[in-house]
Image (tube, rainbow, N blue to C red):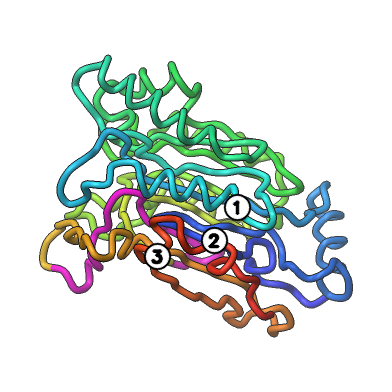
């Protein structure tokens, strides 16, 4: 069988609203021909055959934040929940990559924000929602409140042949994973063959994207050293409030947009300053991103196509149906 690249394991196939993306774990084509051979091959090597499924990544809702540069509060978050519930194919799970809430030094205030976040997120009609903290959730108290509401901040689980790993790179009050968690990661991965499809979700980028803006993880290189021997790794993260992709060896990194406000492109911006709110286009820079893999594209070529769709006031007010936005791409 001809070797397939990691895009064959993880395909982005849906929507984002200030957001994240609806991901499909394998191409949407029927499991026949070369794709079927890939499933059989990886199933024999990894011990479990990958079967198609979808999941959603959301990030940076900052529940409790209200004011410039975004006076909408939780509106974008709530709209994203509505859109997920109206998807023609319901995802198996949702991964939320941090900053669920906006921090507060008053524990009671922060606890109320966490309760509000959970009330909104649990409206999603999905079987499973998994979380990691952001620095606004866990930086002030070392993750104590987060764990009270959501349990451990790093863990792993398997789903339909894909291994998911939640990494906490914020609870040490600095952008760091820490030696104990890295040791845990090594032990967690030890049972898997190098061909296993792996999805890591965390809050901060695991590479130096823009250190002066705190867009980095200080021991990210050590984490990447652990992940680098594995051939099919995808890392999902938030924190930067914009979409971004980066490839490092066998690892592909994807950032999800925020559900509250956007930051500019660091290549073109002199300072880290949120993009101003546009009242005529309330979801500008938070829009919808439709991404799909072109079925039939030759392996080892970039077969991922991206279409960005900006939400308008009509979509915001609910006048325009989500089905128009989420029409199936032509593959």
Q: Is residue 87 above or below residue 128?
A: below
The C terminus is located in which quarter?
bottom right
SS for callout 2? helix
The question of residue 40 being in magenta is answered with no
- The x, y position of residue 58, in whole percent, is 46, 48
Secondary structure of the residue carrying numbered label 3: loop
Q: How far separated are the C-alphas under marks 3 and 1? A: 16 Å
Q: Position of residue 198 (x, y in %)?
A: 62, 51
C-alpha separation, residue under disc 3 versus residue under disc 2: 10 Å
Left or right placement of residue 279 versus residue 176 in this view: left
Callouts 2 and 1 close, C-beta under 8 Å: yes
Magenta residue check for 248:
yes
| 198 shown above or below 328 | above
* CA separation in Å, label 2 and label 1: 7 Å
- Judging by the rendered image, the residue that carries numbered circle 3 is 311
Q: As drawn, which residue projects farthest toward the front? A: 319
Q: Name the foreground residue: 25 vs 325.
A: 325
Q: Residue at x 40, y 34 (%)?
A: 133
Which residue has dot 2 on it?
A: 322
Query: Could you say which is closer to the camera, residue 30 or residue 44?
Result: 30
Q: Are marks 3 and 1 in contact (CB under 8 Å)?
A: no
Q: Which SS type dominates the magenta stretch? A: loop
Q: Residue at image x 47%, y 66%? A: 289
Residue underneath mark 1: 86
Provide the residue span drawn in magenta.
Answer: 246-269
Count all numbered tags in the image, as a single digit. Answer: 3
State the image coordinates of residue 43 (x, y, percent, origin top left). Answer: 84, 54
Q: In the rendering, at what x and y percent does residue 94 appear?
A: 57, 44
């Amino acid at each position: 069988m001809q070797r397939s690249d990691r895009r064959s394991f993880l395909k982005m196939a849906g929507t984002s609203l200030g957001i994240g993306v609806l991901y499909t774990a394998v191409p949407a084509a029927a499991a026949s021909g070369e794709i079927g051979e890939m499933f059989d091959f990886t199933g024999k090597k990894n011990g479990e055959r990958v079967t198609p499924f979808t999941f959603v990544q959301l990030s940076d809702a900052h529940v409790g934040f209200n004011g410039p540069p975004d006076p909408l509060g939780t509106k974008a978050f709530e709209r994203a929940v509505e859109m997920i519930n109206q998807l023609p194919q319901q995802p198996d799970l949702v991964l939320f990559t941090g900053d669920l809430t906006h921090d507060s030094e008053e524990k009671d205030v922060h606890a109320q924000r966490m309760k509000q976040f959970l009330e909104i997120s649990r409206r999603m009609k999905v079987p499973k929602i998994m979380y990691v903290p952001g620095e606004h959730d866990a930086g002030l108290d070392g993750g104590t409140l987060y764990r009270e509401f959501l349990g451990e901040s790093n863990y792993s689980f398997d789903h339909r042949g894909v291994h998911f790993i939640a990494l906490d790179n914020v609870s040490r009050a600095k952008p760091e994973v820490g030696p104990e968690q890295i040791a845990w990661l090594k032990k967690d991965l030890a049972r898997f063959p190098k061909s296993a499809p792996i999805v890591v979700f965390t809050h901060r980028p695991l590479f130096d994207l823009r250190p002066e803006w705190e867009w980095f993880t200080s021991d990210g290189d050590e984490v990447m050293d652990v992940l680098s021997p594995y051939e099919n790794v995808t890392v999902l993260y938030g924190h930067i409030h914009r979409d971004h992709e980066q490839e490092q060896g066998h690892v592909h990194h994807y950032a999800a947009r925020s559900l509250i406000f956007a930051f500019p492109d660091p290549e073109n911006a002199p300072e880290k300053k949120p993009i101003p709110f546009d009242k005529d286009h309330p979801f500008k820079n938070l829009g919808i991103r439709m991404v799909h893999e072109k079925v039939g594209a030759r392996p080892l070529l970039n077969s991922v196509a991206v279409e960005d769709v900006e939400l308008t006031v009509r979509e915001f007010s609910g006048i325009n149906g989500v089905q128009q936005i989420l029409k199936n791409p032509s593959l």
